[in-house]
Image (spheres, helix red, strand yellow):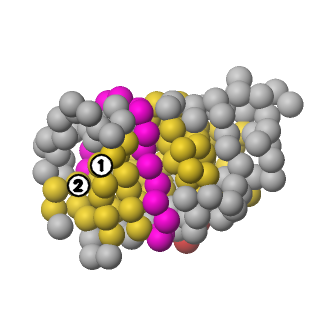
Amino acid sequence: YLGAVSVNAGTLKLGSATALGATNGGTTIASGATLDLGGFTQSAERITVGGAGQNSTGAVINTGAALVNTGLNGPITLTGDTTFGGVNRWDVFGGSLAGGGFKLTKTGAPEIALSNLRDTGLGSIEVQAGQLTILGSTLMGDPSRAATVRSNAALAYWATGTNIHNKPIIM
């Protein structure tokens, strides 16, 4: 189908790689709502998202099969402080992330990688649980805003080449 998808409340769990329809309309996840990838990659879908999601478990999560080096592959725009989470891995891979100076919080046990996204424009980053990986060309945004890593959480860098990561790290 053609057109936009809006998740205004509750959780929308995807059942296929084409569940969000054609990529022309984009998908918006409102504060308090959650998009569950359900183990399905959304290749070029434009995602607009803000908030902590339903029950503060993440505005975008994955409860399906792990999505290593895949997950959300299109442009993502944060409209406010945003939480990513879930019980299985998923990545933001090769698209773009327009952080708008907003805070990104990572919850849940699995790894989430931000891969080859160039400058994300993120404000603060907080890794509350699991691992957040900064991969390839991804930069962490505003260097005056800290990345905080809580107990039993990890911030990893992988294949970042000559990128300079100058965001303060608080552990």
Quadrant assignment, res 99: top left
Residue neighbourhood size for the residue with mark 1, other residues' Cα within 10 Å, grouped as few (<14), some (14–19), many (≥20): some
Given the image, on which type of amino acid does mark 1 rest?
Tyr
Q: Where does residue 81 sit, x and y in percent of width and height?
A: 39, 51
Residue 121 seen anywhere in this rendered image of the structure: no
Judged from the image, the secondary structure of the residue bearing numbered disc 1 is: strand
Residue neighbourhood size for the residue with mark 2, other residues' Cα within 10 Å, grouped as few (<14), some (14–19), many (≥20): many
The residue closer to the viewer here, 112 or 4, is 112
Q: Dominant secondary structure of the magenta stretch?
A: loop
Quadrant where the C terminus is found in the figure: bottom left
Q: How many marks?
A: 2
Residue at the spot x=54%, y=44% of the render?
69
Q: Where does residue 7 sit, x and y in percent of width and height?
A: 68, 49
The residue closer to the viewer here, 31 or 89, is 89
Which circle's residue, 1 or 2, is located before the other in the chain? 2
What segment is highlighted magenta in the picture? Answer: 108-124
Quadrant where the N terminus is found in the figure: top right
Residue 56 is left or right of residue 106, and the answer is right
Q: Where does residue 58 sit, x and y in percent of width and height?
A: 52, 61
Quadrant assignment, res 117: top left
Q: Which residue is mark 1?
A: 157
Q: Which residue is mark 2?
A: 147
Q: Is residue 68 above or below residue 54?
A: above
Residue 121 is left or right of residue 44, and the answer is left
Given the image, on which type of amino acid does mark 2 rest?
Ala
